[in-house]
Image (spheres, rainbow, N blue to C red):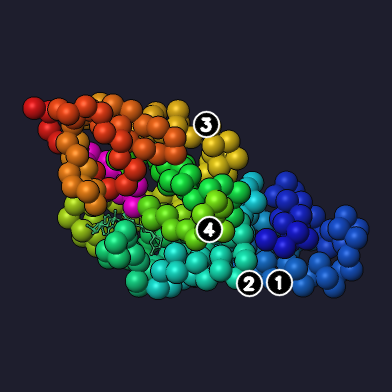
Amino acid sequence: MQETRRRILESLSDAPVSGPALADELDVSRAAVWKHIEALREQGFEIDSRDNGYVLLGTPEFGGAGVEYGLSAPFEIEYHDSIGSTNDRARELAAAGESNVAVLADEQTGGRGRLDREFSSPSGGIWISLVCRPDIPPAQAPIYTLAAAVATTEALRDVGVDAGIKWPNDVLVDGRKLVGILTEMEGEADRVSWIVVGIGINANIDADAVPETATTIRELVGDVDRSELTRTLIERFEELRSDPESVLPAWCNAATTLGQRVRVQTSNGDVVGEAVDIEFPGTLVVATDDGDERVSAGDCEHLRPT
Ligand code: BT5
């Protein structure tokens, strides 16, 4: 959000402030203050003009300005009511050199999962892709998927949803999928150029608009303030990526996979056994009949105990 507008909103959030007082405080002309107020109104901020000054009565429900207002993480929001895929748009921005942008949409018409599977993304969801340019080797990129899963799970628990991570990229409630994560990247042998972390949350959506194996926040606890949830998610993601060592312990708290019997389908065949540990940057250790196996990618299924 533009800095002057952010400061105007901050001033108005405490008490009414007159146009001249705002102009003095921000060191701009009164006409400029008026233009900023008009622009904020257009973005959906409800600002009343009263005898004692401007009053902030309401903030936009969901959208770029609604999410950026009060966000304490260095991400700009690019919002779309409807888009093909936020990951596709984020990849475009990344390829053009952008960083720390979150592409956010209310609806996706071409949402993608791993291996180009379809990801249904009707209006009412939180479909978001974070463009990052970390200074890490490509082999460490999976830590970003884990960080996104932790940030999302914690944000969901804050609103009363009893979510848990299934390795590596799903967030489930009672065995049904509430969130999918798709991490994509480009890089050279020793260094990542960019990473796009795409997160899809079935938020304020009817259960019959998502696959039968899925659930939605609306179904579980009723509708939530999507702007606030998105801010919590981005802020937590920011903390985790700034301190990669903190990701695995937080992941262990938020995940349900450790201690479970699992079947992981990998490109080299199935690995079946008990998930006993997670290692940096996201490798699952499975105790099989033939000893421990380490798996870095695959589709994981939690099996019933034998
Ligand atoms: C994923 O793939 O779960 C990753 C999904 C990532 C979606 C986000 S939304 C923002 C960004 N933009 C995109 O275009 N993508 C990202 P995977 O593990 O391959 O799971 C895909 C499977 O999940 C499908 O084959 C369905 O079985 C199931 N599925 C489809 N839509 C779903 C939904 N809305 N909720 C839960 N499960 C769904």
Q: Residue at x 24, y 52 (%)?
A: 267
Q: Residue at x 50, y 67 (%)?
A: 91
Eyeballing the image, is 122 above or below 175? Answer: below
Q: Residue at x 34, y 64 (%)?
A: 112
Q: Amino acid at mark 3?
A: Ser
Left or right of residue 26, residue 103 in this image = left
Which residue is label 2 attached to? 42
Q: CA distance from mark 1 to mark 3?
A: 43 Å
Given contact means CB atoms under 8 Å apart, are the residues at marks 2 and 1 in contact? yes
Q: Earlier in the sequence, mark 3 or mark 2?
A: 2
The label on residue 188 is: 4
Q: Secondary structure at mark 1?
A: helix
Eyeballing the image, is 214 above or below 23? Answer: above
Q: CA distance from mark 4 to mark 3?
A: 26 Å
Which residue is label 3 attached to? 246
Residue 35 is situated, as x and y percent measured from the top left of the image, at: 77, 72
Q: Amino acid at mark 4?
A: Glu
Which residue is label 1 attached to? 38
Magenta segment: does it hold 270? no
Q: Earlier in the sequence, mark 4 or mark 3?
A: 4
| Residue 12 visible here | no
Q: Quadrant of residue 6?
A: bottom right
Q: Secondary structure at mark 3?
A: helix
